[in-house]
Amino acid sequence: MSLPIKDQIVIVSGAGRGLGAAIATAFAREGARVAINYRASRQQAEALAEKIGSGAKAFQADMRSLAETERLVEEVTTHFGAPTTVVHNALADFSFNGDARSKLDALSWAEMAMQLETALQGALNLIQAARPAMERAAFGRVVTIGTNLFQNPVVPYHDYTAAKAALLSLTRTAAAELGPLGITVNMVSGGLLRTTDASSATPEAVFDIIAANTPLRRVTTPDEAADAVLFFASPWARAVTGQNLIVDGGLVFG
């Protein structure tokens, strides 16, 4: 079964800014109704919803809490209808600046756990909350957001990369379990994006190095990464599940 994007009801976690905002905007552009989830970025999320128009609305919930995530799904269902598609983009507070990240000799488990709670626990909560409606409809699309650092760990983002690697494993095991229900689960893994709040601390020289070593000779934008998310939600990906699509201009080959 497939469903055109224009007929989908989409929840994007962490959509108040950065890549999440680009993903929400891309779905709205194609006619979907979009729930813009935010944890703390209320002003940005509401401004984005106002910019998009009646097809979007901001909803607050902390994805680390199953109760709040279930409330989010209930509120979205009341406003738009049952969600068909969820994108887990929420990111724990993070700055993409390698010089400022903890090396292994100083890395604390608290730092690791903070990333795992948002990346992994948040995804589990969102899947569990959205699954009943998807199962009833015999249709669902789940897209998670990963990183090309799996293949190219050139910066010491140990906590971030480990959490995203765990999320990739959950993406694949969830795909295996939910496939018979008509639900696909896939991951889009970008590289450093130009530019989001999280990458704003990245030195300009790093962007230049990445561009010079990328076949397309430029750094991927949030809008370009967002379009890849739409692919997994579209009818063209109806036979694709459990996959990790790297979207970084060819910097890393998967």
Image (spheres, rainbow, N blue to C red):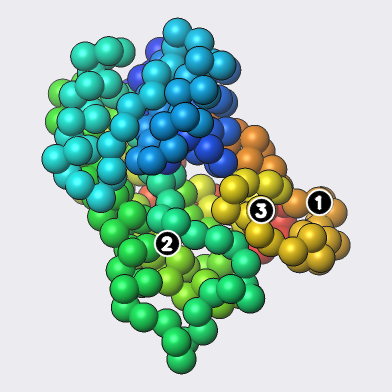
Measured as percent of width and height from the top left, residue 127 is found at: 24, 42
What amino acid does circle 2 point to?
A: Lys
Q: Indicate the position of residue 163 as horizontal and vertical percent values.
A: 38, 65
Pinpoint residue 206: horizontal percent, then vertical percent: 76, 65
Q: Is residue 44 left or right of residue 183?
A: right
In what quadrant of the picture does the C terminus appear? bottom right
| Residue 173 seen by the camera | no
Q: Is residue 98 above or below residue 51?
A: below
**Dot 1 or dot 2, earlier in sequence:** 2
**Could you classify mark 3 by the number of other residues whose Cα lies within 10 Å: few (under 14), some (14-19), or many (20 or more)?**
some
| Along the line of sight, the residue nearer the viewer: 247 or 53 | 53
Which structural element holds mark 1? loop
Element under disc 3: loop
Of marks 1 and 3, the one in the foreground: 3
Determine the residue located farthest toward the bottom in the rendered image: 105
Q: Position of residue 45 (x, y in %)?
A: 46, 29
Which dot, 3 or 2, sits closer to the camera? 3
Three-letter amino acid code at the position of disc 3: Ser
Secondary element at tag 2? helix
Determine the image quadrant of residue 85.
Answer: top left
Which residue is disc 1 drawn over? 218
Is residue 9 visible in the rendered image? The answer is yes
Residue at (59, 48) in percent of width and height: 197
Label 2 neighbour load within 10 Å: few <14, some 14-19, many 20+: many
Q: Tell me, for residue 200, which label it has, or none.
A: 3
Q: Which residue is mark 2?
A: 164
Labels 3 and 2: the sequence-earlier one: 2
- How far is disc 1 from disc 2 in space, using C-alphas? 24 Å
Q: Work out how far the residue at label 1 is from the one at label 3, CA to CA, in angstroms.
A: 16 Å
Q: In this rendered view, identify the residue nearer to me: 182 or 146.
A: 146
